[in-house]
């Protein structure tokens, strides 16, 4: 049986107010149209739903049964409409982001703070992943998008857009102050204790390749889980390390660590946005993504492809 859903909506309001005229006013309609629609509904359902009188209407047992079902659906529909309206105006909503620890520290945290200030009703769920894990989370649909650092291998179907370039510097504790006046080669770094991220990280892969390109071998003495840990270990005089310049600058300014100089130039890296362009985003996620890309470099080639490094 096909019944126009609009009839059920009208029935709900007539039953709620027990009056055709009041229902018509709420629906922005007129009483004759409402009466005609209810006559059609009763005809299609082959039962009487209302007992009409000069004072309004009352429901028959069949009408009571129908109203008990329709009322529940109507409330849920109204709730959904309110939620969608709130989402569209960014009063409510949620964003799920996978981020590498470096990307979170030197880029994403600041952007999230600005977005949360403008849209405090949006819930944020941030997952801390390695670059390969973050890319897999996007591919699996577990997050709206990922913010990662290069190098990265991006599969077909995913898009990667550069958001911000960044540079890294070689630093050591104050016990390495004498080295700060020298120009060291990568091969010479084997003479000093080196702190690095784990072998599974893309940062480790990046520096492994960087060393190999200059005829040197990367041999870390200490492995850390995060760049924050690396900075702490450098301050503790456990060795030297490559750190994002923006993470090291405060400690350098305070004299807690010193910058060491290389003969070789450390290649630029990038913070990138990765998303599945086949999967639509909700309003909140789309707004945040637009904010990120609007602030991205406006130079040719900001949509970049994978580097020559393996996804460990």
Image: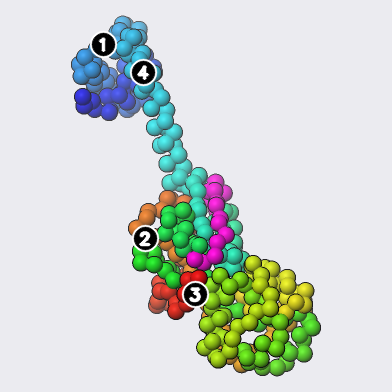
Q: Which residue has dot 2 on it? A: 277
Q: Is residue 298 left or right of residue 41?
A: right
Q: Which residue is mark 3?
A: 151
Residue shown at 57% from the left, 75% from the top: 204
Of labels 1 and 2, the one closer to you: 2
**Residue 241 horizontal/vertical position (percent):** 67, 79
> How many residues crowd around disc 4 within 10 Å: few (fewer than 14), some, or many (20 or more)?
many
Mark 2 vs mark 4, foreground winner is 2
> CA–CA distance between discs 1 and 3?
70 Å
Question: What is the secondary structure assignment of the residue under circle 2?
Answer: loop
The residue positioned 42% from the left and 41% from the top of the image is 84
Q: Which mark is residue 67?
A: 4
In the picture of the structure, the residue carrying the numbered disc 1 is: 48
User: What segment carries the magenta color?
Assistant: 118-132
**Sequence-earlier tag: 4 or 3:** 4
On the image, the x and y values in percent for residue 32 come to 24, 19
Which image quadrant for residue 26? top left
In this view, the mark in front (4 or 3) = 3
- How much space separates mark 2 and mark 3, taking CA atoms? 20 Å
> 242 above or below 226?
below
Q: Is residue 65 visible?
A: yes
């Amino acid at each position: 049986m096909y019944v126009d859903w609009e009839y059920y909506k009208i029935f709900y309001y007539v039953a709620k107010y027990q009056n055709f005229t009041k229902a018509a006013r709420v629906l922005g309609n007129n009483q004759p149209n409402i009466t005609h629609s209810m006559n059609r509904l009763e005809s299609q359902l082959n039962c009487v739903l209302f007992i009409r009188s000069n004072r309004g209407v009352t429901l028959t047992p069949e009408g009571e049964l129908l109203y008990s079902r329709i009322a529940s659906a109507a409330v849920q529909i109204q709730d959904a409409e309110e939620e969608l309206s709130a989402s569209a105006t960014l009063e409510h909503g949620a964003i799920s982001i996978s981020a590498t620890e470096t990307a979170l520290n030197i880029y994403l945290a600041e952007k999230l703070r600005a977005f949360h200030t403008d849209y405090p009703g949006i819930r944020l769920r941030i997952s801390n992943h390695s670059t390969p894990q973050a890319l897999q989370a996007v591919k699996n649909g577990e997050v709206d998008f990922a913010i990662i650092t290069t190098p990265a291998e991006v599969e077909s179907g995913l898009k990667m857009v550069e958001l911000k370039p960044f540079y890294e510097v070689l630093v050591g504790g104050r016990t390495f102050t004498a080295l700060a006046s020298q120009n060291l080669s990568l091969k010479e770094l084997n003479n000093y204790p080196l702190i690095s991220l784990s072998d599974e990280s893309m940062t480790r892969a990046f520096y492994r390749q960087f060393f190999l390109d200059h005829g040197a071998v990367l041999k870390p003495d200490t492995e850390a889980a995060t760049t924050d840990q690396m900075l702490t270990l450098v301050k503790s005089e456990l060795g030297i390390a490559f750190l994002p310049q923006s993470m090291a600058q405060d400690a350098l300014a305070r004299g807690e660590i010193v910058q060491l100089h290389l003969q070789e130039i450390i290649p630029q890296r990038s913070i990138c946005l990765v998303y599945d362009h086949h999967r639509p985003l909700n309003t909140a996620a789309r707004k945040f993504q637009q904010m990120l890309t609007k602030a991205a470099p406006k130079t040719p080639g900001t949509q970049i492809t994978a580097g020559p490094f393996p996804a460990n």
